[in-house]
Amino acid sequence: MLEILEEYSITLLSIGLSLMIVLFKNAKSKRLRRIANKLIVFTKITQELVIQAEEFIHFKGTEKKEWVKTKMNQYAIDHKLPYDEHEIDNLIEEFIHVSKNVNKRGDLL
């Protein structure tokens, strides 16, 4: 089941990263390139943390989500990047939504 989640997450991330890379390469503004690059990095790291959090079987979903948000906040502090809790929260929710859809499909097999 975790392999299926990772496969769908990788597919979703690949599509998102492809779009962001196109934006990044075509951006003439250095500021826009930096923003696109930060978005790529935050997306990738958030996805990795959500997958890690799913392995915490003795924790509730809200606790897992807070763990991911805390890790992302610490990453932003360590790399002197702005942290937007609302955006990270939305990104986590997107990955959770994908995970739930994957689990539904797994139940049908």
Image (cartoon, rainbow, N blue to C red):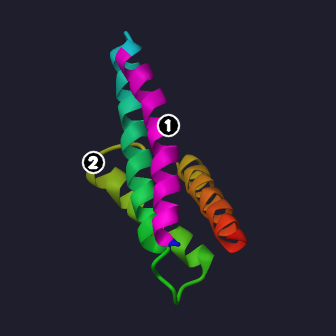
| Residue 27 position (above or below residue 58) | above
Task: State if disc 1 and disc 2 touch (CB < 8 Å).
Answer: no
Q: SS at mark 1?
A: helix
Q: Is residue 9 magenta?
A: yes
Residue in the image at 53% along x and 54% along y: 8
Q: Magenta segment, which residues?
A: 2-25
- Give coordinates of residue 74: x percent, y percent: 35, 60
Residue type pointed to by label 1: Gly
- Give coordinates of residue 70: x percent, y percent: 44, 66
Q: Earlier in the sequence, mark 2 or mark 1?
A: 1
Front in this rendered view, residue 22 or 89: 22
- Give coordinates of residue 95: x percent, y percent: 57, 56
Prevailing secondary structure of the magenta residues:
helix
Residue in the image at 42% along x and 21% along y: 22
Picture disc at residue 16: 1
- Give coordinates of residue 96: x percent, y percent: 61, 61
Residue in the image at 38% along x and 53% along y: 45
User: Disc 2 to disc 1, how far (Cα)?
Assistant: 22 Å
Asked whether, in this view, residue 4 is left or right of residue 35, the answer is: right
Front in this rendered view, residue 104 or 66: 104
Q: Which residue is mark 2?
A: 79
Asked whether, in this view, residue 74 is left or right of residue 86, the answer is: left
Residue in the image at 61% along x and 52% along y: 94
Would residue 69 be seen by someone viewing this image from the given angle?
no
Task: Find residue 48 and report its image quarter.
Answer: bottom left
